[in-house]
Image (spheres, rainbow, N blue to C red):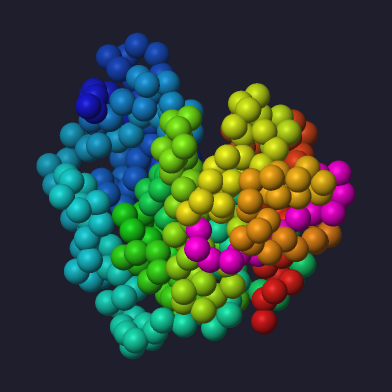
């Protein structure tokens, strides 16, 4: 069940479209961090009294370990009419009219169901997205890249520092939020429709699909959010796209199920995906281990392994001042993760029309 507390805003730490980060104090006793999703509750100012959802901090969560402003008690009402009649976060106290691309661009997507051979890279972790985007843009700077954020992790796109940075760098050109995820350049009701919107409305040459920050797992065979990779690949193929799977790989994760090719990737690709996806395998020190794990799990029998050059994703990221971590580890700690994720971006560039 959620927990709520009242606090006062004492400083503004950061502000960008859809998001504020602030310091708050409870009864003047120290400072703690909170963020505001301004599309849902409006902005706050220093001195405002606010109601916070404190659940994530009390649970000790990682990427979600901030308080969230639920309402600003310093005003009695707030209005921000949406552009259409499509509501996300339905039947919650934060349901909001976001307007859907399907209604606002009906002429372009009314009967559309063909991705026209566009590569669709599907990621199981948010931290794979910058690796894929960096490698893809390195190989083909001319490609227009769309990021489709699913609702498997965080729902607000504004909360992703990575996406904000990738937009600034030009490595993501346009965003689409699907399902109950919200805040993209375009809103879509479901993933297949989001793929079509990315191609037909946003003009994408490559689509990268992945949840927002904060995946969840339970150490069970099927109890993890990254299982959404399988239906996403299937949707891409069914709609005439070219499915590409970004494999989760690590030589630093202490958990046996995530060593080498993670069971998240092995389960989604060997057990549940019906599509025949392309899997980029980077030439170099990780190639043999990746191939061995994919062959042993049966993934290699069901999908196409494509050997690609390793563009040195850690160098691409650091050269643009972008620090990316996954499970708390950066590229120095776990370089294999970045190389194998980046291989999906290189593979997508190589199969792009």
> What are the residue bounds of the magenta stretch?
273-286
Is 277 one of the magenta-colored residues? Answer: yes
Q: Nearer the viewer, residue 8 or 186?
A: 186
Residue 2 visible in the current orientation: yes
Quadrant location of the C terminus in the rendered image: bottom right
Q: Is residue 237 left or right of residue 105?
A: right
Residue 12 visible in the current orientation: no
Quadrant location of the N terminus in the rendered image: top left
Q: Is residue 274 left or right of residue 144?
A: left
Q: Is residue 111 left or right of residue 307?
A: left
- As displayed, is residue 199 above or below residue 148? below
Q: Quadrant of residue 146?
A: bottom right
Q: Quadrant of residue 10?
A: top left
Q: Nearer the viewer, residue 153 or 260?
A: 260
The residue shown at (31%, 26%) is 55
Residue 16 percent across, percent down from the top left: 46, 50
Residue 69 percent across, percent down from the top left: 30, 35
Residue closest to the far top: 29
Residue 341 percent across, percent down from the top left: 68, 51
The residue shown at (73%, 33%) is 251
The residue shown at (64%, 46%) is 297
């Amino acid at each position: 069940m959620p927990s709520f507390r009242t606090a006062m805003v004492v400083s503004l730490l950061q502000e960008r479209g859809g998001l504020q980060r602030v310091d708050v104090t409870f009864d003047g006793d120290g400072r703690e961090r909170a963020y505001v999703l301004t599309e849902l509750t409006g902005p706050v100012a220093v001195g405002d009294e606010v109601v916070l959802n404190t659940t994530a901090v009390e649970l000790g969560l990682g990427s979600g370990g901030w308080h969230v402003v639920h309402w600003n008690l310093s005003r009695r009402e707030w209005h921000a009419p949406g552009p259409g009649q499509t509501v996300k976060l339905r039947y919650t106290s934060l349901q909001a009219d976001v307007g859907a691309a399907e209604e606002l661009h009906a002429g372009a997507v009314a009967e559309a169901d063909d991705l026209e051979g566009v590569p669709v890279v599907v990621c199981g972790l948010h931290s794979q997205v910058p690796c894929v985007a960096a490698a893809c843009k390195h190989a083909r700077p001319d490609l227009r890249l769309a990021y489709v954020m699913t609702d498997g992790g965080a729902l607000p796109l504004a909360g992703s520092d990575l996406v904000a940075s990738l937009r600034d760098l030009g490595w993501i050109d346009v965003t689409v939020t699907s399902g109950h995820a919200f805040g993209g350049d375009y809103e879509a009701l479901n993933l297949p429709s989001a793929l079509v919107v990315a191609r037909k409305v946003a003009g994408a040459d490559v689509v990268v699909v992945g949840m927002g920050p904060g995946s969840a797992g339970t150490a069970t065979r099927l109890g993890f959010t990254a299982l959404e990779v399988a239906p996403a690949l299937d949707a891409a193929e069914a709609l005439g796209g070219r499915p590409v799977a970004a494999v989760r790989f690590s030589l630093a994760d202490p958990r046996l199920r995530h060593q080498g090719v993670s069971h998240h990737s092995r389960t989604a690709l060997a057990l549940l995906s019906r599509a025949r996806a392309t899997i980029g395998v980077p030439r170099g020190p990780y190639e043999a281990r990746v191939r061995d794990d994919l062959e042993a799990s049966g993934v290699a029998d069901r999908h196409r392994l494509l050997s690609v050059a390793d563009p040195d994703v850690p160098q691409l990221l650091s050269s643009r001042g972008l620090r990316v971590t996954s499970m708390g580890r950066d590229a120095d700690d776990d370089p294999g993760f970045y190389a194998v994720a980046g291989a999906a971006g290189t593979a997508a560039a190589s199969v792009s029309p």
